[in-house]
Image (cartoon, rainbow, N blue to C red):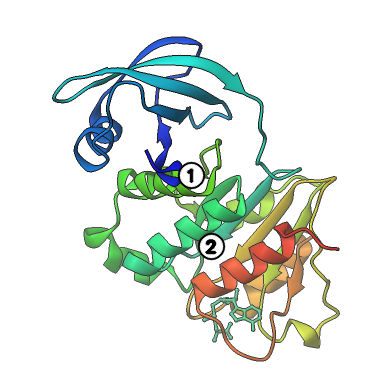
Amino acid sequence: LPVMNRRFFSPAPLQVGPLQLTGTEAHHLLHVLRAAPGDEIILFDGAGGEFSACIESTARKTVACQILQERSVNRELPAELVLGAALPKGERQRWLVEKATELGVTRLVPVETSRSTQQRVKQQRTNTPHDRLQRTVIESCKQCGRNQLMDISPTTSLDVFLRAAPAASHRWMAHPQGATSAHAKVTPAVDLPTWLLVGPEGGFPEHETTQAKTEGWQTIDLGPRILRVETAAIALTSLATLPTG
Ligand code: SAM
């Protein structure tokens, strides 16, 4: 198998020994990659573990593997990173989920603000099911080498989200013209959890930024151009995750 296609996800916890792969991953191995006995693969369970394995036999819908050994690798960020965002719809939402997974976000929280509520009511009929977003997380982890799945929380009100950040955390919210108030600079965090927040297309009204500041959040200006929600989410996340120097 080509090296880049070798990672497969198992929803069951992994340990050395025999394992039957079924479902989407077995289908991909059998009918897309035409895997054969003797092929070597890498399995991850989404909870941090990565294992080398060998295909022993194949059937129409299942692949029998032998898990050989655990590989000790850690591609997670040094500290928890929570990203709250008023999620866009459709393909832009999928894009945000994929990129946030690649950048190592621990948990994505869809946040409902006063200006996103109406939008969400309209969206409910066409809402992307959690399962589809979860599949995007898995595909992204397969591709980028991440062994820990990004969590996606249930939709949370802004008020609850702002207060959920622990007192000992970095709390940064993207807000245009944040420069007019004294604003902070984002640095990659290694010591404390980092909580980030991005608003809806309509932005945050003043009462929401005031509440956030009361709860210990700092506003961050991302430059003079107005970014769409998913661009702002990834720009802010990269400031907090990419290694400097
Ligand atoms: N007219 C809205 C406003 O004035 O806030 C624009 C909202 S923007 C399309 C959506 C979200 O992305 C904002 O709520 C903010 O969190 C973030 N954002 C976009 N551009 C930004 C920038 N230049 N600086 C800081 N945050 C930005």
State the image coordinates of residue 7 (x, y, percent, origin top left): 44, 37
Residue 10 visible within the image: no
- At 32% from the left and 66% from the top, the residue drawn is 90
- The mark nearer the N terminus, 2 or 1, is 2
Q: Nearer the viewer, residue 25 or 236?
A: 25
The quadrant holding residue 212 is bottom right
- At 38% from the left and 50% from the top, the residue drawn is 136
Q: Secondary structure at mark 1?
A: helix
Ligand 1 placement by image quarter: bottom right
Q: Nearer the viewer, residue 89 or 190?
A: 190
For disc 1, the neighbor class at 10 Å (few under 14, some 14 to 19, many from 20) is many
Residue extending farthest top: 17
Residue 100 visible within the image: yes
- At 58% from the left and 19% from the top, the residue drawn is 70
The quadrant holding residue 186 is bottom right
State the image coordinates of residue 221 (x, y, percent, origin top left): 72, 80
**Amino acid bearing label 1:** Cys
For disc 2, the neighbor class at 10 Å (few under 14, some 14 to 19, many from 20) is many
Location of mark 1 (residue)? 141
State the image coordinates of residue 189 (x, y, percent, origin top left): 80, 53
Q: Is residue 190 above or below residue 92?
A: above
Location of mark 2 (residue)? 85
Q: Is residue 226 above or below residue 94?
A: below
Q: Nearer the viewer, residue 182 or 140?
A: 140
- At 30% from the left and 34% from the top, the residue drawn is 25
Q: Are marks 2 and 1 in contact (CB under 8 Å)?
A: no
Which label is found at residue 161? none
State the image coordinates of residue 169 (x, y, percent, origin top left): 79, 49
**Amino acid bearing label 2:** Ala
